[in-house]
Amino acid sequence: MKGFKEKKVLGRKCQSCGTVYVPGPTYCRKCQKEIDTIVEVKDTGTLGTFTVNLADIRGNPLDKPNIVAYAKMDGSDTWLMSRLEGWSVGRLCTQVCV
Ligand SMILES: [Zn+2]
C-alpha cells in the first residue's frame, strides 16, 4: 500500500534467480524461496492484450465500458491483469490499435 500512496509501482525481486514480480508474491514461483526484497519498477510497460467489457457478469449493460488489460511493467519479468482507470476505448485505440 505504501507504493500506491506514493504513486509508485512496486514489485518483489527474488535474490536467488533475479526474477522481478509485479504484483509481488512472498515466494518465488521458480525457486520456491521467500522473497522479501521490494523494488520499484517503471510506470510504463508493454500491453499484451486487452478486452472491453460492455456488460456486467449478469449480462446487464454497463453505464460506460471498462477496459481490462494484460501488461508487463518495464523492469518486471511478469505480466499482470488490471482494469485501466481513466482510459476510454477511443484513447486506447488511438494510442495502441495502430
Ligand atoms: Zn527465484
Image: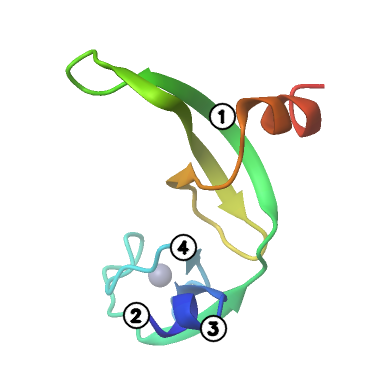
Question: According to the image, label 3 marks what residue?
Answer: 6
The secondary element bearing badge 3 is classed as loop
| Residue type, label 4 | Val
Q: Which residue in the rendered view is the most extreme toward the left?
A: 58
22 left or right of 94 in image = left
Q: Which residue is drawn at 68% across and 32% down?
A: 92
- Find the distance from the CA under tag 4 to the CA under tag 1: 17 Å
Return the x and y of residue 65 as percentages of the image width and height. Answer: 46, 25
Q: Which of marks 3 and 4 is nearer the N terminus?
A: 3
Q: Residues within 10 Å of mark 3 (few under 14, many from 20)?
A: few
Q: Upstream in the sequence, badge 1 or badge 3?
A: 3
Rendered location of residue 5, percent (x, y): 47, 81
Residue at mark 2: 35
Question: Mark 2 or 1 closer to N-term?
Answer: 2
Image mark for residue 22: 4
Closer to the camera, 28 or 82? 82
Q: Specify the label residue 25 is tagged with.
A: none
The residue that disc 1 covers is 49
Which label lies toward us, 2 or 1?
1
